């Protein structure tokens, strides 16, 4: 029995966009980057019970008791009004779930999925829970066939990855810009540790996917293409997925940035292909 808990923003029992095959996707609350382009910006912060969202709920699904905000799952209509009102980029709907409670949910769908993906927010900010969950899955005869993946921003020390190494199957990691200063502009943090994580994961056969994000007029991969190609080649045979930025759902200045089209993505895709690097193009453009 493992009662370690995580702050969970959402569980999607069947997802086909969070890794290979059909997967249960677990979204943990809280992130250590502040990406201007985040499509789940309400998963970045943590609720501090300020109650600013409570009076705005049109369905009376929120109330405050003893200084804590309470969310009534049964009454909530998933209108997302509270997310728009939160000054912390948090949600009052996040729940503390234990490893056992998550495993109960996984067991219900286990015959129909190929694995689970823990995403966020940033999954590795709740590393002890992640290690406990994956360890429990690998030790369970009925669940150990499920692959355990992490969708990560890569901002984790080598010591952290080493804790995950025995119990996880891989990580899908974003490299949002090549240049450090540009990465800081886009995400608020340097990218040296992220590049190190990507190299370390590849060297340990745990890099499931490298992800690049094309943002029209704010993307530096082509400017630094020689270093980028050299970096990718050193990773070995790792899938490279190109994602297209779309402005829908993002907060702040990036709401006004132009969404990427195939014309924005193709120069990078074709450049990498000319260098014999196989790429996965965006499945759709919005
Ligand atoms: S979700 Fe946001 S607005 Fe609502 S109580 Fe928590 S911090 Fe305040
Ligand atoms: S999503 Fe938020 S605002 Fe909408 S009904 Fe649920 S708790 Fe209320």
Image: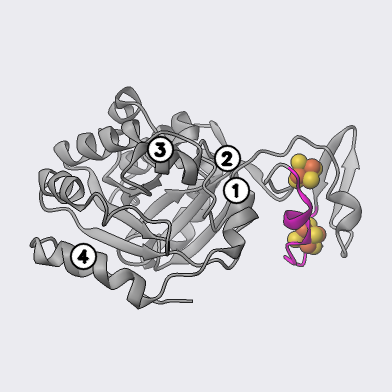
Q: Which mark is residue 43?
A: 1
Give the distance between the C-alpha atoms of the residues marked 4 and 1, in whole angstroms: 29 Å
For disc 4, does the CB lie below 8 Å from ligand 2?
A: no
Residue ID at (49%, 62%): 13
Q: Which mark is residue 30?
A: 2
**What SS does tag 1 mark?**
helix
Mark 2 vs mark 3: which is more N-terminal? 2
| Image spot of residue 76 (x, y percent) | 78, 62
Between residues 67 and 285, which one lies in front from this camera angle?
285
| Image spot of residue 187 (x, y percent) | 48, 43
Q: Are marks 2 and 3 in contact (CB under 8 Å)?
A: no
Mark 4 vs mark 3: which is more N-terminal? 3
Mark 4 vs mark 2: which is more N-terminal? 2
Residue ID at (35%, 49%): 174
Give the distance between the C-alpha atoms of the residues marked 2 and 3, in whole angstroms: 23 Å
Nearer the camera: disc 4 or disc 1: 4
């Amino acid at each position: 029995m493992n009662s370690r808990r995580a702050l969970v923003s959402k569980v999607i029992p069947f997802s086909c966009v969070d890794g290979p095959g059909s997967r249960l996707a677990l979204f943990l609350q809280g992130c250590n980057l502040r990406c201007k382009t985040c499509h789940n910006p309400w998963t970045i912060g943590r609720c501090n019970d300020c109650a600013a969202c409570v009076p705005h709920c049109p369905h009376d699904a929120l109330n405050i008791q003893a200084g804590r905000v309470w969310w009534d799952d049964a009454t909530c209509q998933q209108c997302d009004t509270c997310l728009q009102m939160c000054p912390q980029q948090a949600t009052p709907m996040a729940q503390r779930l234990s490893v056992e409670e998550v495993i109960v949910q996984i067991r219900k769908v286990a015959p129909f999925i190929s694995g689970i993906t823990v995403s966020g927010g940033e999954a590795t900010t709740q590393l002890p829970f992640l290690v406990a969950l994956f360890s429990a899955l690998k030790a369970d005869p009925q669940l150990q066939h499920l692959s355990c993946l992490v969708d990560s921003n890569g901002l984790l020390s080598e010591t952290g990855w080493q804790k995950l190494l025995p119990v996880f199957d891989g990580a899908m990691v974003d490299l949002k810009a090549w240049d450090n200063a540009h990465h800081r502009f886009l995400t608020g943090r340097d990218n040296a540790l992220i590049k190190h994580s990507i190299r370390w994961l590849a060297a340990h056969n745990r890099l499931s996917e490298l992800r690049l994000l094309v943002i029209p007029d704010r993307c530096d991969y082509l400017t630094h293409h020689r270093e980028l190609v050299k970096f990718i080649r050193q990773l070995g045979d790792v899938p490279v997925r190109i994602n297209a930025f779309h402005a829908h759902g993002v907060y702040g200045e990036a709401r006004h940035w132009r969404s990427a089209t195939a014309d924005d993505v193709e120069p990078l895709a074709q450049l990498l292909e000319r260098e014999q690097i196989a790429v996965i193009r965006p499945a759709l453009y919005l």
